[in-house]
Amino acid sequence: MKRYLPATKRFAAIVLGSGLLVTACYEDPGVIAGELSSANQFRYVCDESAAVESCSGTTATVFPTAVAKGALFRLSIDASSAREVDELRPISDEVVGTDASGAWVCGTEGLAGFVAFDRTGSVVDYVHVKVETPLSLRIDSYRSVGDGFDRASGRRLTNASVRDGETVTVSVAPVGKSGIPLAGALPFVWTTSTDGVVRITSNGTPTSPSAFATIAAVKSGQTRIRVEGAGLSTEFEVTVP
């Protein structure tokens, strides 16, 4: 049964994102053109629940190729199209509900469709979002900059070294059959195999999940960090010299 779930212009963000190219930003504003007219666009703003690839600048310019099955995400109408587009509704069997904040959840693999309506209720545009089941988890690391990190420095991580007084930012990305990180907010749990070597702190909360975490050195030694989410897990080694 198809469900029609209204989404208005107050939804200013989509939680998470990946790009049409693996060099796209996943965590910054981006716009997708509708499939009927490039004049009617849909904006997303990924938060820290998404994985970040190497970026040129801080703004994404492409829409996520695919969203993780079971992940939360949002879309909104771009301000430049507000005169033409009044409402955006998902109309697809894959869109199965919303959470308390109004984010959509795609529970079935396939294509989720979203249709834009004008103030008279006429269809003016539409867009499709691919939904994929996560098949593996990927870890990336980022260079620290002050109290934050450089989102342009993301690189694939298999092991890390954290010196005393330093921190390393890491993120986990679910990967589907397309082979690219998937958009959408999913909860992840981080644990260490050896207590007291490093301290790992998730950037998210139970109600606002994040793919990002910060590793801080505690004492010299080695440990393995395990991350679990979407029914999957992966590990990587961390050394404190």
Image: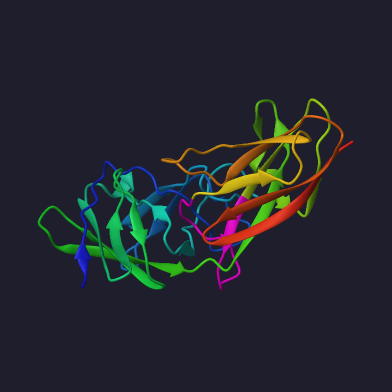
* Residue 221, image quadrant: top right
- Which colour style is shown? rainbow
Along the horizontal axis of the image, is 92 left or right of 227? left
| Residue 38 falls within the magenta-colored stretch | no
Q: Nearer the viewer, residue 129 or 226?
A: 226
Q: Residue at x 52, y 44 (%)?
A: 210
Along the horizontal axis of the image, is 148 left or right of 134? right
Up-down: is 138 above or below 81?
below
First to last magenta residue range: 172-186
| Coordinates of residue 209 in the picture (x, y in percent) | 48, 44
Along the horizontal axis of the image, is 29 left or right of 103? right
Q: Nearer the viewer, residue 2 or 128?
A: 2
Up-down: is 6 above or below 200?
below
| Coordinates of residue 30 in the picture (x, y in percent) | 46, 49
Q: Residue at x 50, y 49 (%)?
A: 187
Residue 125 visible from this viewpoint: yes
Q: Nearer the viewer, residue 64 or 37?
A: 64
Q: Which residue is drawn at 81% across and 36% down?
A: 162
Q: Which residue is drawn at 32% across and 57% down?
A: 39
Residue 56 visible from this viewpoint: no
